Image (cartoon, helix red, strand yellow):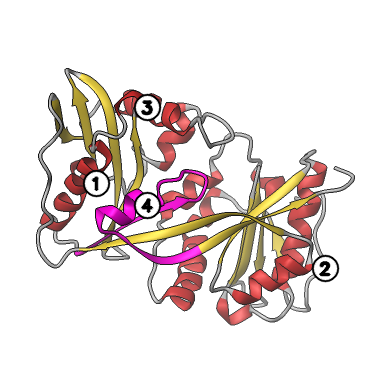
């Protein structure tokens, strides 16, 4: 059990999460997304990948809150950053504040000097809570969408560049390219096993809708996609181009290949998430995507950590 359990309103109880809770957590997060956005974007594979993060100890780093009837009312995890969700039926009862207190205490005990949490800008109650606890905005994030009434056109590739779908055995090469490309802004390189759980080994991974760009047999760009049946749309999870092949139109080419593949699969919408540190928002807008909603990463320094 966690070293610290916050005080809860009467009728609620807390315990750590286990792998067997993946489905219940997915239902909770889905309910939050439906209320806030009118649609679901999460999938069980993404939640399972979080619970399997290297360094995350579920007994210490996760907390679930159930109501008197045993239904999951809220959840939280903390491991380099944190996530907190409260079911819409249970909001306004202090559960979010209790989990925020728990997450900060756990981060301090783990030796962290700060804690960060991403909150949708439309979730004004959660934003007010964070700001009241001393959190400050750090990074802007956007979920973009590409609507497809007709089959998207795919531009001609640059000279020498070919594109094909993801094939078995492409994982290690895609991992190296993504990590190299993301080195400029991400805090650390993800080991292959951790990265793969969120991408190519995730149940929702869609190899046929993932595009790989080669120049003379050398991998120079990737667009790795998820097919999200519950949402009824596709998702480009990661886009990366080798530094020495940028500004050639390869990212646009890869995205258009992915969009067309999703359209042929019957999807009429494709999403992609990015944030201000990447500097890629203008690229995605030029490709024809538009902003669906925005979020902000809030950070708090932890004195005494």
Residue that badge 3 annotates: 243
Q: Nearer the viewer, residue 210 or 221?
A: 221
Residue 233 versus residue 204 in the image, above or below: below
Q: Quadrant of residue 55?
A: top right
- Residue at numbered disc 2: 7
Number of the label disc, if any, that sits on residue 255: 1
Q: Position of residue 272 (x, y in %)?
A: 35, 54
Q: What distance separates the C-alpha of mark 4 from that of mark 1?
A: 14 Å
Q: Callout 1: 10 Å neighbours few (<14), some, many (20+)? A: many
- Contact, mark 2 vs mark 3 (Cβ under 8 Å): no
Which type of secondary structure does the marked residue at label 2 adopt?
loop
Asked if residue 52 lies in the magenta stretch, the reply is no
Which numbered disc, 4 or 1, marks the residue that appears first in the sequence?
1
Closer to us: 203 or 164: 164
Q: Are marks 2 and 1 in contact (CB under 8 Å)?
A: no
Quarter where residue 201 is shown? top left
| Residue 269 as seen in the image, left or right of residue 172 | left
Region rendered in magenta:
268-294
Q: Crowding near pointer 2: few (<14 within 10 Å), some, many (20+)?
A: some
Q: Is residue 3 visible?
A: yes
Residue 137: x percent and y percent?
Answer: 66, 58
At horizontal 31% and vertical 62% (from top left) the residue drawn is: 145
- Whichever of callouts 3 and 1 sits on the residue coming sooner in the sequence is 3
Comes first in the chain, label 4 or label 3 = 3
């Amino acid at each position: 059990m966690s070293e610290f359990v916050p005080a809860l309103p009467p009728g609620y109880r807390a315990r750590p999460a286990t792998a067997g809770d993946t489905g219940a957590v997915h239902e909770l997060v889905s309910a939050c997304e439906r209320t806030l956005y009118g649609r679901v974007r999460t999938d069980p594979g993404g939640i399972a990948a979080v619970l399997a993060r290297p360094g995350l100890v579920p007994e210490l780093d996760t907390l679930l809150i159930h109501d008197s009837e045993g239904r999951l009312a809220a959840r939280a995890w903390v491991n380099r950053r944190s996530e907190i969700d409260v079911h819409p039926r249970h909001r306004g009862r202090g559960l979010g504040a209790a989990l925020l207190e728990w997450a900060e205490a756990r981060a301090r005990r783990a030796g962290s000097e700060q804690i960060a949490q991403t909150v949708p800008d439309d979730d004004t109650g959660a934003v007010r809570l964070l700001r009241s606890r001393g959190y400050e905005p750090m990074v802007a994030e956007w979920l973009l969408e590409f609507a497809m009434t007709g089959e998207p056109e795919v531009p001609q590739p640059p000279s020498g560049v070919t594109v094909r779908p993801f094939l078995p055995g492409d994982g290690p090469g895609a991992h190296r390219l993504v990590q190299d490309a993301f080195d400029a802004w991400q805090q650390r390189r993800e080991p292959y096993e951790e990265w793969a759980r969120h991408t190519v080994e995730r149940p929702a991974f869609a190899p046929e809708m993932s595009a790989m760009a080669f120049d003379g047999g050398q991998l120079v760009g990737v667009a790795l996609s998820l097919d999200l049946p519950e949402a009824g749309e596709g998702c480009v999870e990661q886009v990366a181009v080798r530094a020495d092949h940028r500004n050639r139109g390869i990212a646009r080419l890869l995205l258009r290949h992915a969009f067309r593949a999703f359209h042929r699969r019957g999807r009429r919408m494709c999403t992609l998430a990015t944030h201000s540190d990447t500097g890629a928002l203008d690229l995605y807008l030029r490709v024809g995507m538009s902003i669906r909603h925005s979020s902000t990463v809030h950070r708090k320094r932890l004195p005494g950590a």
